[in-house]
Image: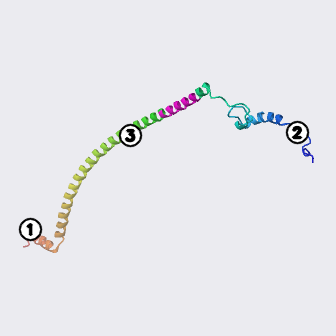
């Protein structure tokens, strides 16, 4: 069996040469990077270099990262506090505005109640006058009233 029968133009290379091509720009573009040595082309499990010792520089770097994280949290907290303060200020001004509007509406409501009471009294008087006028019209529309008026007119004319 011929192993390279389908690929006559290709050569079979050794493993070392294959490792070199793994570290090529193609692998770097794909983003495979070792977490131990930070080189491209392999992962931490395949790394040949010894692990980085946790010396003072390592601890300084970790502390710096922690401080940066804490600082960003503080900045976020300060931004949040500033936003809360602005929100409180806006709410306080809104409450004051609403209080003044409520006071205005109370005053308007009071004057409208007074006007309504005055109109109600006037309406009652007009209704009483209407009832009197209606009763008077009913009385004048009767036969007795008509005959009384005829007698009165006849007396004035001297017919009687």
Residue designated by label 3: 94
Closest to the observer: 35 or 148? 35
Q: Point out residue 43 in the picture as x, y percentages from the top left corner.
A: 71, 37
- The image quadrant of residue 11 is top right
Residue that appears at 30% across and 43% down = 103
- The image quadrant of residue 92 is top left
Seen in the picture, residue 108 relative to 24 is either above or below; the reply is below
The secondary structure type at the circle numbered 3 is helix
The reply, left or right, for residue 144 in relation to residue 44 is left
Say if mark 3 contacts mark 1, CB within 8 Å: no
The reply, left or right, for residue 129 in relation to residue 38 is left
Residue that appears at 39% across and 39% down = 91
First of labels 2, 3 by sequence position? 2
Q: Point out residue 77 in the picture as x, y percentages from the top left corner.
A: 48, 34
**Image quadrant occupied by the C terminus:** bottom left
Q: Point out residue 144 in the picture as x, y percentages from the top left corner.
A: 14, 74
First of labels 1, 2 by sequence position? 2
Residue that appears at 40% across and 37% down = 88
Closest to the observer: 63 or 109? 63
Closest to the observer: 4 or 108? 4
- The image quadrant of residue 156 is bottom left
Seen in the picture, residue 8 relative to 65 is either above or below; the reply is below
Tell me the CA gap for discs 2 and 3: 80 Å
Indicate which disc residue 12 carries. Answer: 2
The secondary structure type at the circle numbered 2 is loop
Q: Point out residue 79 in the picture as x, y percentages from the top left corner.
A: 48, 33
Residue that appears at 45% across and 34% down = 81
Question: Mark 3 Cα within 10 Å, few/some/many (few <14, many 20+)?
Answer: few
Residue designated by label 1: 156
Q: Which residues are magenta?
A: 62-77
């Amino acid at each position: 069996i011929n192993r390279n029968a389908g690929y006559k133009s290709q050569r079979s290379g050794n493993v070392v040469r294959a490792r070199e091509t793994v570290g090529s720009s193609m692998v770097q573009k794909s983003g495979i990077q070792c977490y131990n040595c930070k080189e491209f082309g392999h992962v931490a499990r395949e790394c040949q270099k010894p692990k980085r010792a946790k010396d003072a520089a390592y601890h300084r770097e970790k502390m710096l990262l922690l401080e940066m994280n804490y600082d960003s949290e503080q900045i976020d907290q300060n931004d949040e506090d500033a936003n809360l303060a602005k929100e409180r200020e806006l709410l306080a001004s809104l409450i004051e505005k609403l209080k003044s509007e409520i006071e205005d509406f109370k005053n308007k409501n009071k004057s409208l109640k007074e006007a309504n009471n005055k109109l109600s009294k006037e309406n009652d008087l007009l209704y009483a006058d209407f009832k009197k006028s209606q009763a008077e019209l009913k009385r004048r529309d009767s036969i007795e009233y008509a005959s009384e008026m005829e007698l009165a007119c006849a007396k004035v004319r001297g017919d009687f």
